[in-house]
Each structure stands twice: as structure tokens, then as C-alpha cells.
Image (tube, rainbow, N blue to C red):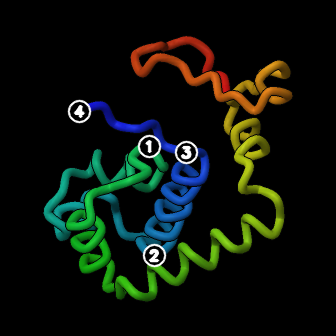
Amino acid sequence: MVREPLSIADRLRGERLGDLLREARGSRSITDVALRAGISPETLRKIERGRIPTPAFFTVVAVAGALKLSLDGLLAQVSLSETAAEATGEHSGRRRAQSRGVMVRRDDQRSGRQNLPHPHFTGPRYL
């Protein structure tokens, strides 16, 4: 079974989720929160940085419980952030990608085609 590639909107939603979890964690260490949630610190770090844009539901439940967040509140905040991003035009992902050091090729901008690198490619990333 081949998994469909994530859309830019899915990636941005994952980044917003990570930002909200990092903000809720505050001054607590990643290790402390991860152990309370029953996941590895590296997994929590990846979720917070948006490297795991679609974490498993039970992982989100565990992290929300460790941070004493309600799932309804978390969903509302992610949705609110998504609406705000669409209103500012950030939903295209281009501006955010460039701010993170991802190069956007001009020919792909005109055609609307995404030129994503191979998952094991270690060179510059293109969108």
C-alpha cells in the first residue's frame, strides 16, 4: 500500500499543532513531558518541530493529557490558527518554506507543481 504524500496544508497543520504543544509545555523539559505521556523525547521533539505532521491520535491524546490540555481546546486552537493562516495568505506554504531555508524553484511556482525530494536526499530541499 502506497501512502499519499502530505499536502502543504497538512504539513502546516502539523507545524501549528507542534507550536501549540511547545507553547503549552512552557518551561517544562521535553523529557519530563514525553515520559509523562509515555513516548520518547525524540518523538515529542519531532512533533513540536513539525517533522511528524500527522502524529497518531493516541500520541496526541497522551501528550495533551501530560500537558493537561483538553482535546476539544487543542482542536479549536489548531482550527483557529488554520483560519488565521488562510486569512493572511500563509496557507500557500511558500512564505513559511522560504523562512525555514527551503528553496522554492521559479518554474515550479508557475506550474503549481511540487518538486519534493526523495526522503533520503540530504541536499537542499525544493518546493
> What residue is disc 1 on?
51
Which mark is drawn over residue 1?
4
Q: Secondary structure at mark 1?
A: loop
Residue reaching furthest left? Answer: 38
In percent of width and height, residue 118 lies at 46, 17
- Callout 3 amino acid: Ser
Q: CA distance from mark 2 to mark 3?
A: 26 Å
Which residue is found at the position 23% from the left and 32% from the top? Answer: 1
> What residue is disc 3 on?
7
Which residue is found at the position 73% from the left and 25% from the top? Answer: 103
The answer to whether marks 1 and 4 mark residues whose Cβ atoms lie closer than 8 Å is: no
Q: CA distance from mark 4 to mark 3?
A: 18 Å
- Callout 4 amino acid: Met
Foreground: disc 4 or disc 2: 4
Foreground: disc 2 or disc 3: 3
- Callout 1 amino acid: Arg
